[in-house]
Amino acid sequence: MTTQPAEDRIVVLESFADPITAHLAKGRLEAEQIPCFLTNENLVSLNPLYGPATGGVRLHVRAQDVAAAVEILRYEIVPMAVTRPDDEPLPDVVHCPQCDSADVAFGPATRNTYSFPMLLLSVLLGYPLRGKRYHCFHCRHEFKRPER
């Protein structure tokens, strides 16, 4: 029986509860040219309840790369701030015509907005057809998009 040198051994670096996090860590290591692979990935993906029993998705690296891999995975990636060019116009922000608040969302109307034809069509189809309107969360006013 032959034994491998200590630096050629494969060791479990970390265990993850979900495959997505494991793939993110694997991608970070591969971007730094550290060879690695995952085990138990399919088992945990198909049967998430087996994850704790099997030890989760395991990330394996060579023993000689452990220190570098730990150092890479220690720091979280902070996304860079995205700035808008000065010449790019700001997106249109809808303001409430009653209170001038920008806390407005577009969606199904919360109040009864049925007209007689819509009511008749809703009864015949068996499905409520509601109009979509802007809703102000500040004063609860509902309105259609204001004309410019």
Image: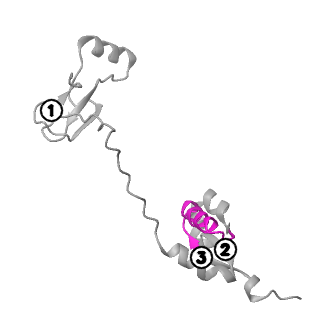
Residue 24 lies, in percent from the top left, at: 56, 62
Residue at the disc numbered 2: 60
Q: Quadrant of residue 78?
A: bottom left
Residue at the disc numbered 3: 69
Looking at the rendered structure, the kind of residue marked 1 is His
**Left or right of 112: which side holds 130?**
right
User: Residue 22 magenta-drawn?
Assistant: yes
**Sequence order check: which comes first, mark 1 or mark 3?**
3
User: Residue 128 magenta-drawn?
Assistant: no
Q: Residue at x 67, y 75 (%)?
A: 61
Quarter of the image with the N terminus in it:
bottom right
Q: Is residue 5 depicted above or below 78 in this figure?
A: below
Q: Is residue 53 depicted above or below 143 in this figure?
A: below
Q: Residue at x 18, y 41 (%)?
A: 137
Residue range of the region highlighted in magenta in the rendering: 15-36
> Around disc 1, counting alpha carbons within 10 Å, would you say few (fewer than 14), some (14 to 19), or many (20 or more)?
some
Secondary structure under badge 1? loop
> Around disc 2, counting alpha carbons within 10 Å, would you say few (fewer than 14), some (14 to 19), or many (20 or more)?
some
> How far apart, in angstroms, are the residues tagged by discs 1 and 3?
55 Å
Residue at the disc numbered 1: 141
Q: Residue furthest front?
A: 87
Looking at the rendered structure, the kind of residue marked 3 is Ala
Q: Is residue 108 depicted above or below 90 in this figure?
A: above
